[in-house]
Image (cartoon, grey):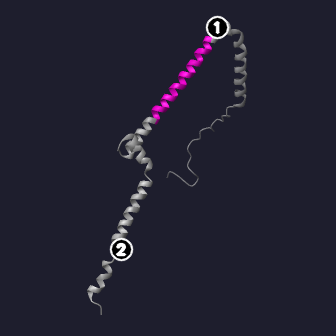
Amino acid sequence: MKKPDTLLTEIERSIFVKALVISTIAHVVLLAVTSFSLFADWGKYGFHAPSYINAQKSKENKEAEAARRKAEVEAKAEAAAKEKEAASDPKAEKTAPAAEGQAQAAASEKDEKVTPPEIEPLPPKKEFQLGDDLTLD
């Protein structure tokens, strides 16, 4: 029969502390490796929660999209102004019909390719009827 003290010697040599340290190191390394984008966001937006950072990113994306659309509208308005100015210029009148003819030909080619879908009318509305096996009695 063994004495209780001899049984405890194996428990004292347990690998619990070593396993706990290795597990902690492994978790820290895994979290650090998978969080590079969060660290980059913290560098740009400051130390905030990911939800705040995502809200800031979406706000920036919306502002960039609005600026892009505004630039497109301004470019179209500028092009329209140049066309109008060119149309009023007497020297450009000689070349304008040829350019207009090319533009109309291109537009007609586009129109020929695009055909609207056929629209079928809905069937006539029917009154509600109970089935043969149903009665209101």
41 with respect to 98 (left or right): left
Task: Tell me the residue at 33%/78% (across/down).
Answer: 13
Residue 80 figure quarter: top right
How many discs appear? 2
Q: Nearer the viewer, residue 34 or 65?
A: 34
Amino acid carrying mark 2 in the image: Ile
Left or right of 8? Residue 23 is right
Instruction: Please tell me which residue is depicted at 62% across the width and 15% down the height of the picture.
Output: 83
In the picture of the structure, the residue carrying the numbered disc 1 is 89
Q: Amino acid at mark 1?
A: Asp
Q: Nearer the viewer, residue 82 or 7?
A: 7
Measure the alpha-carbon separation of dots 2 and 1.
Answer: 92 Å
**Residue that carries the numbered disc 2 in the rendered image:** 15
Location of residue 76 (image quadrant): top right
The relative height of residue 57 versus residue 134 in the rendered view (above or below) is above
* x and y, in percent, of residue 41 in the image: 41, 44
Indicate which label's residue lies in the foreground, 2 or 1.
Answer: 2
Q: Quadrant of residue 31?
A: bottom left
User: Which residue: 70% across, 28% down?
Assistant: 110
